[in-house]
Image (cartoon, helix red, strand yellow):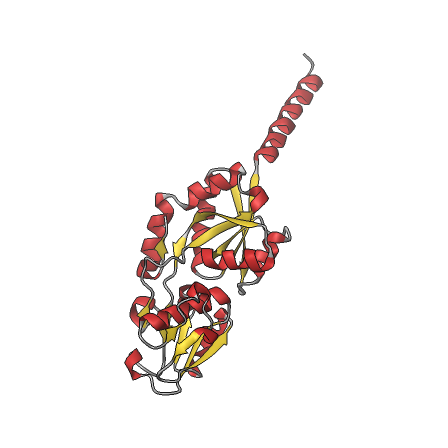
Amino acid sequence: MGTHVLKNILLALVFSVASASLVQAETIRIGATGGPHAEILEQVKTLAAKEGLELKIIEFDDYQLPNAALVNGDLDANSFQHQPFLDAQVKDRGYPLTSIAKTVIFPIGLYSKKIKALDALKDGDKIAIPNDPTNGGRVLLLLQSNGLIKLNPDAGIKASPLDIVENPKKLKIVELPAAQLPRSLDDVTVAAINTNYALEVGLKPERDALVQEKTDSPYANVLVVRTADKDKPVFAKLVKIYQSPEIKAFIKDRFGASVVPAF
């Protein structure tokens, strides 16, 4: 066999192997809010690379954008929301989205720069809560469980300030975007802050929260994909990696009681 022919065969084999690798390569564009969600995904990304799966993590600072981006095809998956939030978005906006796995729970907490305990609240004090329906209702239930207000029993997890039927201290409920709540602490007496945003500004829930949700909260966060894609093998691979012992150990070591694995 001539040298020229042998060289052509070797080149063909090289291109064939390269083409096969390209075909096998899998990439997931996954959206997340900054903080723990993104940090955990960075660890998932490292493990995924060993399994031939590339994660491209895209960070958002707004709760409304990642689902819209997923529906529009700018993302393949997202990891930022709990199940009640997803359910509300699917119902209210008709998003064809489905959760494929539980990830973590961020017990929401009440924080203050002005008081050391909830019994120090005075008449007319301001309490800032998230302005999205599910997280807002979640905080109102937390306020109720601590005896500060009473809600219409029919309101459930979608309770709004309009569902408050008893408010002995005439507390003023201020609704703000979740990401702005840490900055509101100078202007209100108490702010209800999601753990991911609390950690971003140096707040430690187990140390700084006046009160915190119980870890058996139904608000487990989830991995979400388009409903049409939910059975794709690549997402089964992603779930297996996310819910691995290595990721669970990382979450516990990195975040302690502030972030609780839901798997």
Q: Most extreme residue toward the top, as rendered?
A: 1
Res 192 quadrant in image = bottom left
Estimate the x, y position of residue 108 in percent, counting from the top left. 38, 66
Report the label total.
Answer: 0
**What quarter of the picture does the N terminus occupy?**
top right
The answer to whether 88 appears left or right of 249 in the picture is right
Specify whether residue 156 is in view: yes
Res 246 quadrant in image = top left
Res 151 quadrant in image = bottom left
Closer to the camera in the image, 121 or 37: 121
Closer to the camera in the image, 3 or 135: 135
Estimate the x, y position of residue 76 in percent, counting from the top left. 57, 48
Q: Is residue 36 above or below residue 177?
A: above
The answer to whether 63 appears left or right of 47 in the picture is right
* Residue at image location 66% in from the left, 18% down from the top: 6
* Residue at image location 30% in from the left, 67% down from the top: 206
Closer to the camera in the image, 231 or 252: 231
* Residue at image location 31% in from the left, 60% down from the top: 257
Estimate the x, y position of residue 111 in percent, counting from the top left. 36, 75
Estimate the x, y position of residue 156 in percent, counting from the top left. 42, 64
Specify whether residue 82 is in view: no
